[in-house]
Image (tube, grey):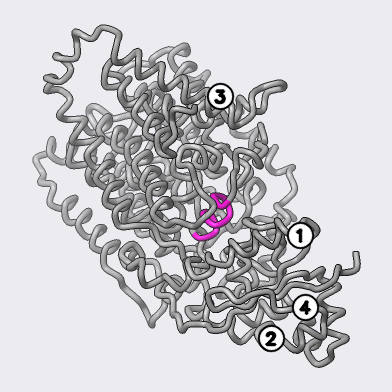
Amino acid sequence: MPALTDPFAPLLLAIAAPLLWGWRWRRPTWQILLLGVGSWGAIGWLSLLPGGPGLRQAFGLLVGLDLLLVAAALVVRPHRWRERLGDRSLRRPLLAVLAPALLCAVALGWRGVILEFPSDGFVYYATYFGSDLLDTVRLDPLRYSAPANWFFTAASFLFGFPEALEPWRASLLAALNTFLVLLASCQLSLRFTGKVALCWLTALLFLLGMGHQNFSFFHQIALNGTLPGLALVLAGATPLLGLLQGVAWPGARRVGQATAVLLVSSYVAYHAHGVTAFLTVNLLIVTSTASLVLWPSRQRRVVGVAGAGVLLLALNRLPWHPRLESFYAWPETMRFVHDYRLLGHRFFYFWPSLPVATWEPVFLAALGFSGVCLAFWRSWRQPPGAVLALALLAPLVLLEWWAPFVSDLVFKLIEPDSAYRLVWTSLFWISIPAMAWALERRWRAAGRTRGVLVVTIAGLIAVMAFPLELRGRPNVLVSKVPHLLTPLEEVRQADGATIEPILKPLRELCDRDPSLKGRTLLSDPYVGAVVGTRQCLLPVAARDITKLAASTVESGQYPGLRRALGSPAALKAWLDRNRVDLVVLRGDYAPYLSRIARASNHWQPDLVSSYADLSLNSLTTAQLQRAGFRLERREQGMRIYLRTRAAPR
């Protein structure tokens, strides 16, 4: 839309339109989320239709629809605005749902997101948002594929991402994702418990517990599609979980309608992040099981058992994921996928361990609460059905990691190193408050105090909030708070800001010589990761999670370079063989130790500084001149060498 010249105008409109519509007509939060976030995913699907609009045209259509929605909310029945502004019933959902989500989003957005090489957050922003995805991404209508999914294209459009790395824009995106998932989570918590305080507890457990080992979610995964996908699934599951709160069987028609809402929203969410498919499956399993417990039916029980058996047999026939074999090369202390044979069948099981994942304290707490709730289930006078479904989630995740045939769901359908993400599908940040509320009701009815519950929740928060190390290594009780509070200035040497200045001269070289397109850029992996997708050359080395240390970079990404340095002819042959037309060398490597790396054990703390020891940095101007390169320019402490004649094709 030409009138929307500000890059944030589409974002503000896309957020404000469904909120205004929901406020105006008193719609539940889950419907607002489905309308708002679901429309971002739906336009990606729309662009896939034969003869359908392109992504840019589809997002333009979204802006038009949002404008119509705002106009309808403002114009239709305007006399009710006075009633709306004076409606005291809004206070509870505002305090319990909107307030914690908005407070966390504003605080984290103001605090800022850390983009440190080689973390996932760095890669998401440098790669996915470093180019115009509306012109380059082609979505897959059936399967999730990053970055070819609607979340990245929506972020590119709504935020007006430029090609320069601007951490404040990334912080706004992470804050928006935080807001969406907490809005969906808090509305479910309020619906189950009716307690404002438990909605705030839901937000706190999410902030302290969500993430990867001791990586805070905000700094590590909030720039991908996980959180919007979770928000959509939670919103879509609300009607189905709500039916479990009833006393009598709601009827097949209502159950079918609620299930259809979940499946449609989950289909869209799956194209934001694949882990949402497992959350959908788990929600369907636990809601079906809970319904059979609440409203026993021989016919439904037979259908459910038969369906589960067919599913397990079908999974048993599928081949194992090919990446399973690669884990046998890992040291035993670092492996988290193991196998055993029984009756001639090969079974795999998952054991979260360093460096990939740990048992999350919140997951252990969710298992504990689940055990207590399930043990006391028959003694409830008015059993809360949705709480029963939530209590079944954590044991189900444990079965998916351990139980034969059931674990096939993980190791045959997703990459094994993503198995730790199943802990998120236990919805611990929602299930723990809901189960605590249910137990408190039962104990209060029995004349007992809630002191044990208060102490348990307080202890859980303390474990997650305060770091604890055993023998100097991260363990199950490591807190994410230090990662969350790491000063942004501390990671300046590894967030891409020092490499950004060379992008302009590299683009100028590409514009001046179109034959450079598709040729190779030789630099250290950090430089290659920053500039890799935002100029015409392909980096020899970039971020490769299996080859990060200087020693593995040398052997894995620059094989043969060290030996080639001993002879001008050998060096020229190596450069020709790798199609190198441009060389970027840094003059100085500032000392840098990553606090995040020390805490998480994911990469060596001095990784960025250690690249100074690469054989690449032994190259001199004289050597490169003899190999056919000239010093093109010096820029921000870096030397750029360009090949003086065309390389052999």
- Tell me what residue is drawn at x 77 percent, y 56 percent: 514
**Which image quadrant for residue 194?**
top left
Q: Which residue is mark 1?
A: 513
Which residue, given by chain and number where applicable, does mark 4 sit on? 629
Q: What is the C-alpha distance between the residues marked 1 and 4?
A: 15 Å
Q: Amino acid at mark 4?
A: Phe
Q: Position of residue 303 (x, y in %)?
A: 57, 23
Q: Secondary structure at mark 4?
A: strand
Residue bearing mark 2: 615
Taking the image as shown, residue 407 lies to the left or right of residue 440, namely: right
- Asked whether residue 470 is drawn in magenta, I would say no
The mark closer to the camera, 4 or 3, is: 4
Considering the whole magenta stretch, tell me its main secondary structure: helix
**Where does the magenta region start and end?**
122-130
Query: Which amino acid does the dot numbered 2 rest on?
Result: Ser
- Kindly identify which residue carries mark 3: 302
Res. 198 visible in picture: yes
What type is the residue that disc 3 sits on? Val
| Residue at 49% in and 57% down | 165
Q: Is residue 374 visible?
A: no
